[in-house]
Amino acid sequence: MKPQNRLACSEAVLSGDLFSGFTVETPTQLEAGVAMDNNRRKFSKLLCGSTMLGTALSTRRAIAAPLDPDSPNAKSLKFTLKSENENTVCSGCLFYSNVDDNNGRCIIFNNSEVPAVGWCTSFQAKK
């Protein structure tokens, strides 16, 4: 029976073994009686972990694109950059999440960035 590789890149990160100093041999190396160089293993685990971490962080901090008022979706919902009624603005809508004082993201427009003072026909007041 041939031994199996016991640790994949994602398993090393998830199990917390990212920086541990053990050696994992491949079946070919075991048959030849050669152990894998531990420094290369540490480096590859570090590289794998930093790539996965970088991907997770960049995805989480993604900046939403501003909504184009001329897009078909915005036109169909009669989106305006400034509401005519200050009681029905994007910042008071259920679908709006605040990013800063002037802008936020709207679920209706695929989390695009919209001005806090904007308006569309999908407006639903927060309760």
Image (spheres, rainbow, N blue to C red):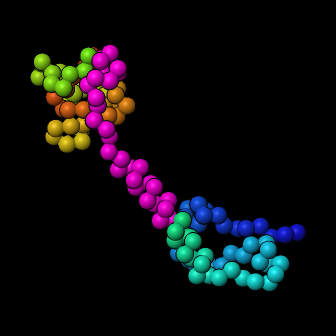
Residue closer to the observer: 68 or 101: 68
For residue 36, above or below residue 47: below
Question: Image quarter for residue 25?
Answer: bottom right
Magenta highlight on residue 62:
yes
Residue at (83% x, 78% y) in the render: 31
Q: What stretch is highlighted in magenta?
A: 49-77
Q: Percent from the top left, x then y, of residue 99?
A: 24, 42
Q: Is residue 124 visible?
A: no
Question: Image quarter for residue 23?
Answer: bottom right
Question: Image quarter for residue 100?
Answer: top left
Residue at (46% x, 60% y) in the render: 53
Residue closer to the observer: 100 or 55: 55
For residue 4, above or below residue 101: below
State the residue lying farthest toward the front. Answer: 70
Q: Percent from the top left, x then y, of residue 126?
A: 24, 26
Residue at (35% x, 21% y) in the render: 73
Residue closer to the observer: 118 or 86: 118
Magenta highlight on residue 53:
yes
